[in-house]
Amino acid sequence: MKKIHYLIATLLCATMTACMDFDWDEHQPNGTETGNPYVQDTNVVSIADLKKQYATVIDAGSYKQVDKTMEVKGVVIGNDLSGNIYQQVIIDDGTGALVLSIAQGALSGVLPLGQEVLVELNGLCVGGYGKQPQVGTPYTSSTGNLGIGRMSRFTWQGHHRLLEKKAPMAPIEFDQSKMKDSNYKKDFCGKLMTIRNVRFAAADGKAVYASENDPQTGGAVNKQLVGINSNQLVVRTSTYAKFANKPMPQEAVDITGIFTRFNDTWQILLRDESDVVPHAN
């Protein structure tokens, strides 16, 4: 009987080992490798289709775990290079944009703008934070509420594979006439876009993007644009961004950034100070 039990245990161990995609202890002892070479594009869905499939949990600020083999493929349009985007990478596949929440620093070093990445969603969660679609893992807030949060570095390593490096994706024009349109928000939130010929309401030559003395929510400061209600759109800057203490320009500018949403408010996340340029008349 002992021999039978031993044989069964041996077979189970062999089976479990064969099913493991990657031996991280063996292949990544120093954390120098990135991604899982065994992630394959067996069932790639568009980001637009993914958002439709999980629309209910996204809109509810909840999440749902993916329980089947399914991948998304996209190009990096936003990362943590300047410190304004924290532990997140934003990808776009042409049909829509998606926030990947990852508890890891220096992501821009391995996921620069233009890097194409394949993400295996099986086992991860799709959800929404303020109706902004995200991929991550469950998170419990300090008040005990469950929501979508950052996946661990180890989890991320096992769920993605780097593909080719492409030219950085060009921004598209933000349609101000559709600023309050609910379908426009759903389709374009997270996209890299440009809003043209606007001015910072508080700019006086001294006021900066994000002072520690400014009113903050979540360690970031919202700045209003002239003529646009702050309940509709703001420029959101982390106090840890490299350009946080730079004065905002007083002249009319074109602003490019990741147009995320928090419920019904657009929040523009600058990728770098160079995303703000003088408006050409």
Image (spheres, rainbow, N blue to C red):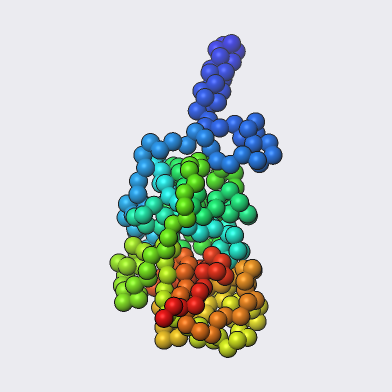
Instruction: Determine the residue located farthest toward the right in the rendered image.
Output: 30
Q: Position of residue 267 (x, y in %)?
A: 46, 71
Which residue is at 56% across, 63% downward?
Answer: 85
Q: Position of residue 44 (x, y in %)?
A: 37, 42
| Residue in the foreground of this view, choosing between 156 and 241 | 241
Q: Is residue 143 visible?
A: no
Q: Position of residue 173 (x, y in %)?
A: 37, 69
Image quadrant in which you'd find residue 228:
bottom left
Which residue is at 56% across, 66% downward?
Answer: 272
The N terminus sits in image quarter: top right
| Residue in the foreground of this view, choosing between 275 and 67 | 275
**Left/right of residue 182 with respect to residue 244 in the rendered view:** left
Q: Position of residue 199 (x, y in %)?
A: 48, 83
Image quadrant in which you'd find residue 212:
bottom right
Instruction: Determine the residue located farthest toward the front in the rendered image.
Output: 281
Which residue is at 63% across, 55% downward?
Answer: 105
| Residue in the foreground of this view, choosing between 226 and 136 | 226
**Left/right of residue 248 with respect to residue 259 in the rendered view:** right
Which residue is at 55% across, 21% downward?
Answer: 14
Q: Is residue 129 visible?
A: yes
The C terminus sits in image quarter: bottom left
